[in-house]
Amino acid sequence: MIIVLKPGATEEQINHIVEKLKGFGLQIHMSKGEERTIIGAIGDERVLANQPLEIFPGVEKVMPILQPFKLVSREFKKEDTIIEFENGIKIGGKKIHVMAGPCAIESKELLIQIAEDVKAAGASFIRGGAFKPRTSPYTFQGLGEEGLKYLSEAKKKTGLLVITEVMDPRDIELILPYTDIIQIGTRNMQNFRLLTEVGGYDKPVLLKRGLSATIKEFLMSAEYIMAKGNTKVMLCERGIRTFETYTRNTLDLSAIPVIKKLSHLPVIVDPSHGVGKWDLVAPMAKAAVAAGADGLIIEVHPNPEEAFSDGEQSLKPKAFKELMKELKEIAKAVGREL
Ligand code: PEP
Ligand code: MN
């Protein structure tokens, strides 16, 4: 249920409504827009069947949220969500931000070298996995905490913010001090325990779309995080599984405008995992920006042949730099900045 308040509704009126709703065991989520406040009452709405909420002082209208996802929906929050980071970086606003780096953190020297390269090209975040969700248990699984320390060093050296993946609820506390964004990987999109746990922190989360997830399922997973109080969620389209085998996955670019219509959350696109081939990354990155993405996450490695993972889809720093220049033009053409 959404309760839209009148523009001048007082704190006293708001508290009165909130207390009433809480009394019915509903969870309250407030959305304070520039013009008006919206109260989201989440739970079993049948308890409100005989409550004339419309006549409460300060209330303009009362509407059911028709979508199965509530806090994530545009119905609940009309304005785009903007997530703010240190150094004044904002994701979800006019400026498009790029996260770049190796698939996996391999060594301190290499990570710092890549961080310097992507920073010089204009990236805002260094990416790199310390805990890797590999298909085979016999391949490189990541450096663990050692890798997280290298991310912090790369941040200190370059000023880039950090994004890294958490695979297990038991690792969240370990990862938190090292990262600015918690990444939840494709294979964990429906790990509801993990979603619920990260929902309990204030740290921004990048949620990747599941390999075979519909957009509705994707948004329901984001709802799990938001329902626990963490509103700083970004949705990442990274390709889905289709019958096509030429590319690793099929990057669903239509997901960008669809999600933008259904939700207020920022959309990030990962063209690297989306196509799985380095020479297809640039065209898809450009298409993503043209289609309205708020950010990109791209794999970069100076020596893809020797990369511990995903070398075939990694851009060399020079190609990444070229791409960043081209992306600036595309961004300008669609009224954005990069
Ligand atoms: C990654 O970004 O390193 C990764 C493993 O991606 P995904 O979860 O999309 O496969
Ligand atoms: Mn990868």
Image (tube, rainbow, N blue to C red):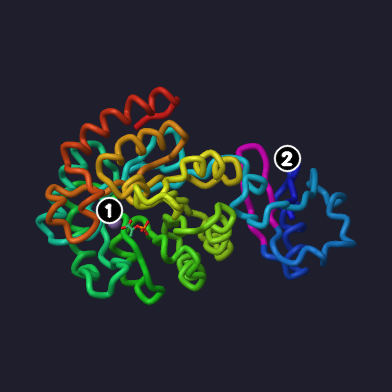
In what quadrant of the picture does the N terminus appear? bottom right
Position above or below: 214 against 143: above
Indicate if the residue with disc 1 has its beta carbon within 8 Å of ligand 1: yes
Q: Magenta residues: mostly which secondary structure?
A: strand
Whether residue 18 sits left or right of residue 271 in the image: it is right
The residue closer to the viewer here, 305 or 237, is 305
At 18% from the left and 49% from the top, the residue drawn is: 301
Q: Position of residue 33 (x, y in %)?
A: 61, 42
CB atoms of marks 2 and 1 within 8 Å: no
Please give the range of residues in magenta: 28-40
Q: Secondary structure at mark 2?
A: loop
Closer to the N terminus: mark 2 or mark 1?
2
Q: Residue at x 71, y 59 (%)?
A: 41
Quarter of the view holding residue 264: top right
Tag of residue 127 = 1
Q: Quadrant of ligand 2?
A: bottom left
Residue appearing at x 35%, y 40% in the figure: 97
Q: Amino acid at mark 1?
A: Arg
Residue occupied by mark 2: 8
